[in-house]
Image: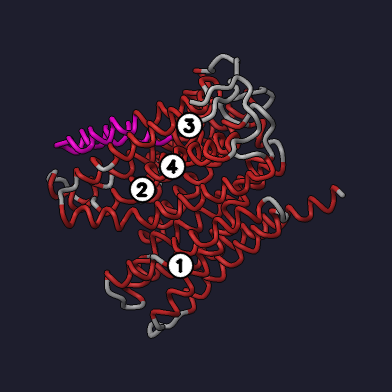
Amino acid sequence: MTSSAFPEPGLHGLARISAMSAVALGLLLAVLDYSAANVALPTIGHDLHVPSSDSIWVVNAYQFASLVTLLPLAALGSRVGFARMYLIGTTIFIVASALCALSHTLTEISLARILQGLGSACILSVNLALIRFIYPPKELGKGIGLNGLVVGLGVALGPSIGAAMLSVASWPWIFWLNVPLGGTALLLGFFALPATPRSSAPYDMPHTLLSVLALGGIALGLDEFAHGHLGLKGFGPLAIGCAAICILWYRQHDHAAPIFPADLLKHRPFRTAFLVSVMSFMSSNLFMISIPFTLQTVLAKSASLTGLLITAWPIGVTIASPISGRLADRLPVGLVSSCGLLLTGCGFVILCCLSPTASDPMIAVAILIAGIGFGIFQPLNNRAMMANTRAGREGGASGMVSLSRLSGQTLGATSTASIFMYVPSRASLLCLILAAFCALIAAVISGSRLLTVRTAR
């Protein structure tokens, strides 16, 4: 790590390139592994002799572990240093990847994926906090734009890399690939990441456990609902999680550096950006999960063509994110992010209105429009969350950015599963309609920031 007890506001030249490369590679690892492992689920289930319904735990274990530990690890990162937390997370991720590759039973790989999710959460909880120290305030949008670009590339390349690996090797090599990539990220991070100020506040273990219980209970309850368990099995965990959230808010709303960042959520700009992010990622996941069914069952496209058409989404995100990052430092976030979400919603509406005889270019253009809109929105909104954070709370803000993404993805996944369970005949269309609705509602909420600015003036 670059040594400086009181770092300057941003790095320059080769120092910035090296530090940002380390952050980007760690983020790429976390995103890439999630999407690449999805492709391998049928093969893993077959080799481990478990049914498809059980093999889904290879994915669920990773996402659940990441979701419930993000906020505690963000708070811990503020105390041990963001660079050190990144290095710890990358090390855990490398070890867990090797354990995944060496697993011979579902229990073994699920436990390894939990550990891998913990490593991922260490990285995700501090990556935007590190970017705030890598880029000076006036150029923060560029760094966050690059962050969005890496996420887009990870989503785009993950399935392709997973499929390519399976075509020439067995599924463990998907996890072995993480070892050299993680080693490179670890080496870069050790020498290039800037030292950052640390909080001297003692770590709050009771509220850490309460935070895990809150997020875990809500996630588990929603998952049970999605699988048709409407009784105590579903309501029980959800009620416990909601009660834990209320207790956390009551006990931590006046703390200077809480585990649950109630201090950040009390400020309207941050709260608005967080809510918009959750709604938008719920919208994108409703689309991402349901669109293969729409293309194959409604529009009669082949599996290979479906994969090709869906690639228009990450291409759109990849094109728009760097441009949006530059706009983030010059234009009002409420205006540009609302326009992006309106584009995303319009793309989804076009898909809903397509006839079964729609041409492939028309489908691709609709998906591309939605992807470009999402790429415009994301860096701007993330910058709004980080910029509306006081000094010393970068870790909490970074954790909340990642939490908003994972929460939205979880809500989108459970909503999709519920729709497919209760309305199977028109599920794919209903998911697209709900995705469009969420995107347009998010655009309206985002646009409310313009009214706040005018009122302030």
Q: Residue 320's quadrant in the figure? A: bottom right
| Amino acid, disc 1 | Leu
Above or below, comparing residue 237 to residue 354 in the picture: above
- Decide which of tag 4 and tag 2 comes sooner along the chain: 4
Marks 1,3: beta carbons within 8 A: no
| Amino acid, disc 2 | Leu
Tell me, yes or no, whether the highlighted magenta stretch contains residue 441: no
Mark 2, residue position: 32
Q: Report how far apart the C-alphas of labels 3 and 2 lie in the structure.
A: 23 Å
Single out the mark in the foreground, 3 or 2.
3
Would residue 302 be found to the left or right of residue 393 on screen? left
Mark 1, residue position: 430
Q: Report how far apart the C-alphas of labels 2 and 1 lie in the structure.
A: 29 Å
Work out whether residue 201 can be spotted.
yes
| Amino acid, disc 3 | Ala
In the rendered image, residue 34, in percent from the top left (x then y), is placed at 35, 46
Q: Residue 355's quadrant in the figure? A: bottom left
Single out the mark in the foreground, 1 or 4.
4
Single out the mark in the foreground, 4 or 3.
3
Mark 3, residue position: 192
Q: Report how far apart the C-alphas of labels 4 and 3 lie in the structure.
A: 16 Å
Say which residue appears at 39% left-offset and 66% top-offset: 310
- Decide which of tag 2 and tag 1 comes sooner along the chain: 2
Say which residue appears at 44% left-offset and 35% top-offset: 123
Above or below, comparing residue 200 to residue 49 in the picture: above
Residue density around tag 4, few if under 14, some if 14–19, many if 20 or more, within 10 Å: many
- Decide which of tag 4 and tag 3 comes sooner along the chain: 4
In the rendered image, residue 154, in percent from the top left (x then y), is placed at 40, 51
The magenta-colored residue range is 92-121
Between residues 177 and 383, which one lies in front from this camera angle? 177
Mark 4, residue position: 27
Q: How many labels does the image show?
A: 4
